[in-house]
Image (spheres, rainbow, N blue to C red):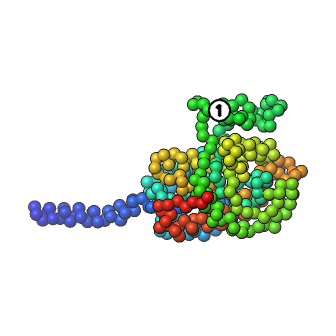
């Protein structure tokens, strides 16, 4: 009996020791930063780049992690402090993917910084193709719509807020049955800090894009080399285009931000991301104050003068490669500032006036 008890004890100790590596792997990784992109047309490395590829290759996100909750695998660096994901395009995918990541028990995201970045259409009244904008406000599109052919003739367009009777009311109606937040305000001092780190970066221009911009001479901010700016974000499930829609986006951002915001970039994901950020924050899974939204312009939101809107809408993004490069340039500059000063940024979110 003593021998049997000794053998059983030894077997139990051996099993426990063998289980230690597995237990250690199950402990959540303390993530310092998450790079969030929306699409990649091919492989993560080595082919035609999308939003994700430069991050994977240049930040050495070499470890591939299976992700049943997302559209493709997560990527991580060798010390498991930086993650990169592709969410999939549109509001449904962006919300679902970020929620899936935030609830994944393999990762401790409570001190992680999120750099949400991707390409966008830019308002030519605000800037040029290739430019980058850090968003202070993200505005969504829960909205009423009336075909302009059926709308009163004095309406500028057919979109108007839920509960309202016309576009651009003096006050957005409050209703418990229709009210849903279309406004997500980021940590503006942190956004200001990110802008300060990047405002003097030189974004490489492209001769073809420079020639394309010449047609926009009536838009002084459109016909110049790309720059880094602060500018706000309208996220819609509609992949829209044209002068009427652009005027609506300008008015809509002003309406929801009470005149504080300026429409610069449009996309189909960011209000979904921010919805997930808000919910995960309530669950104490992430810190919403550590989230940045960076968009870089691959195209204008209106056609060149004299060009049909449908041709412009369906054409390839003339500034796609520029936008991928400027997203990585600006985003990685901020990423490295955060990581290089982790003793401070772990507990204190950077800020600037």
Quarter-wise, where is residue 27 in the image? bottom left
Residue 165's x, y, as percent?
A: 71, 29
The residue wearing badge 1 is: 173
- Give x and y (percent) for residue 114: 55, 57
Q: In this view of the protein, which residue sits in the foreground, 70 or 155?
A: 155
From what the image shows, is residue 114 above or below residue 170?
Answer: below
Relative to residue 183, is residue 223 depicted above or below? below
* Residue at (58, 58) in percent of width and height: 190
The answer to which image quadrant residue 146 occupies is top right
Question: Residue extending furthest left?
Answer: 1
Q: Residue furthest right?
A: 306
Q: Is residue 336 left or right of residue 311?
A: left
Query: Measured from the top left, where is residue 64 in percent x and y?
Result: 52, 63
Residue 92 is drawn in which quadrant? top right
The answer to which of 213 and 72 lies nearer the viewer is: 213
Q: Secondary structure at mark 1?
A: loop
Nearest the eye: 235 or 100: 235
Residue pictured at 70% horizontal, 41% vertical: 255
Question: Seen from this angle, which residue lies furthest front?
Answer: 353
- Quadrant of the snapshot with the C terminus: bottom right
């Amino acid at each position: 009996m003593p021998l049997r008890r000794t053998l059983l004890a030894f077997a139990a100790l051996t099993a426990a020791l063998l289980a230690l590596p597995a237990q250690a792997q199950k402990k959540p990784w303390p993530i310092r930063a998450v790079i969030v992109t929306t699409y990649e047309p091919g492989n993560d490395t080595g082919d035609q780049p999308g939003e994700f590829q430069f991050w994977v290759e240049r930040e050495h996100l070499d470890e591939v992690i299976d992700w049943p909750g997302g559209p493709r695998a997560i990527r991580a660096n060798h010390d498991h402090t930086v993650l990169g994901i592709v969410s999939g395009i549109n509001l449904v995918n962006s919300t679902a993917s970020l929620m899936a990541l935030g609830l994944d028990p393999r990762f401790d995201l409570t001190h992680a910084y999120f750099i949400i970045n991707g390409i966008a259409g830019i308002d030519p009244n605000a800037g040029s193709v290739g430019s980058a904008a850090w968003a202070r406000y993200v505005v969504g599109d829960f909205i009423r719509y009336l075909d302009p052919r059926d709308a009163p003739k004095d309406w500028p367009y057919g979109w108007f807020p839920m509960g309202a009777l016309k576009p651009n009311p003096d006050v957005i109606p409050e209703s418990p049955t229709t009210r849903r937040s279309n406004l997500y305000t980021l940590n503006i001092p942190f956004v200001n800090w990110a802008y300060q780190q990047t405002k003097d970066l030189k974004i490489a221009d492209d001769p073809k894009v420079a020639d394309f911009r010449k047609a926009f001479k009536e838009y002084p901010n459109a016909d110049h080399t790309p720059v880094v700016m602060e500018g706000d974000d309208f996220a819609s499930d509609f992949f829209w285009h044209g002068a009427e829609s652009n005027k609506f986006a300008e008015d809509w951002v002003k309406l929801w931000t009470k005149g504080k915001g300026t429409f610069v970039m449009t996309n189909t994901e960011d209000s979904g991301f921010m919805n997930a950020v808000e919910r995960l924050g309530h669950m104490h899974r992430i810190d919403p104050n550590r989230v940045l939204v960076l968009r870089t312009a691959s195209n204008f939101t209106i056609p060149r003068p004299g060009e049909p809107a449908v041709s412009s809408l369906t054409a390839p993004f003339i500034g796609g490669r520029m936008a991928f490069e400027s997203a990585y340039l600006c985003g990685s500059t901020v990423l490295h500032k955060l990581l290089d000063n982790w003793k401070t940024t772990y507990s204190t979110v950077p800020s600037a006036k």
